[in-house]
Structures are given as C-alpha cells and as structure tokens.
Image (spheres, rainbow, N blue to C red):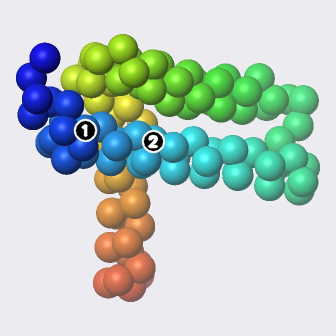
C-alpha cells in the first residue's frame, strides 16, 4: 500500500473530508427545512413523498460515500459525494456573493 495515500494529510483524504463535510451540511440543511416545513404546515401529505425522496437520496449519497471511503475507494467516494457537495458549494458561494455585494435588482 502506498504510504502517501494513507497519511492523514494526503490530498485525497483532504478532498474526501471536504466533500463529505459539504455534503453533510447540505443534508442537514434539507433536514432542517423539512422540520421547519412540518412545523409551519408547508410539508403536508400532498408533498411528503417528494420530501422523503429528497431526504432519502441525500442520506444515501452520504452513506454510500462513507462506505466507499471505508473500503478504500476514496476516488469513487469523492465522485459520489460531489453530487451534493459541488452544487451546495456553488450555491453557498452565490449566496455569499449576494450578501457581500448587496446588488440592487431594479
């Protein structure tokens, strides 16, 4: 086994943990919106299947990414986690840009 691949600061491990953290944040945000929606009534029996599908998909991506990493398939784990992490990061950067620049939309 390559010793550089197993070191705690190898680039693949850092990228894996970064994508895992961002994907976990996206999952937590979706779960938070779900809980708030249950509280205010916007999540109802009409759209419950959509919400449960969304939450199941995000949880499955996190679980699959973690399992792949644990079995030594870090590159594939990064690719799976990037399904959530890349759009979440791009939206976060967009929201930060809107907050910082405070554009006038008129």
Q: Name the residue carrying label 1.
A: 13
x%, y% of residue 31? 69, 44
- In the picture shown, does residue 93 fall above or below 21? below
For marks 2 and 1 on the same chain, the one whose residue lies earlier in the sequence: 1
Residue 99 appearing in the image: yes
For residue 14, side relative to residue 54 (left or right): left
Disc 2 vs disc 1: which is toward the camera?
1
CA distance separating discs 2 and 1: 15 Å
- x, y (%) of residue 96? 37, 72
Question: Mark number for residue 64?
Answer: none
Residue hosting label 2: 23
Q: Residue at x 22, y 23 (%)?
A: 75
Q: Compared with residue 100, is residue 58 higher up or lower down, i.e. above or below?
A: above
Work out whether residue 65 or residue 88 is closer to the camera in this orientation and state it.
65
| Residue at 38% across, 31% down | 81
Query: Is label 2 in contact with label 1 (beta carbons under 8 Å)?
Result: no
Q: Tell me if mark 2 has few (under 14), some (14-19) or many (20+) residues whose alpha carbon lies within 10 angstroms of its own.
A: many
Visible residue check, residue 61? no
Quadrant of the snapshot with the C terminus: bottom left
- Does 89 appear above or below 87? below
Where the N terminus falls, by quadrant? top left
């Amino acid at each position: 086994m390559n010793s550089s691949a197993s070191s705690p600061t190898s680039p693949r491990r850092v990228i894996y943990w970064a994508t895992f953290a961002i994907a976990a944040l996206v999952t937590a945000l979706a779960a938070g919106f779900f809980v708030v929606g249950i509280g205010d009534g916007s999540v109802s029996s009409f759209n419950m299947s959509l919400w449960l599908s969304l939450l199941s998909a995000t949880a499955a991506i996190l679980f699959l990414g973690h399992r792949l990493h644990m079995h030594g398939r870090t590159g594939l784990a990064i690719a799976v986690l990037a399904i959530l992490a890349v759009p979440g990061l791009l939206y976060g950067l967009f929201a930060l840009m809107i907050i910082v620049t405070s554009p006038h939309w008129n």
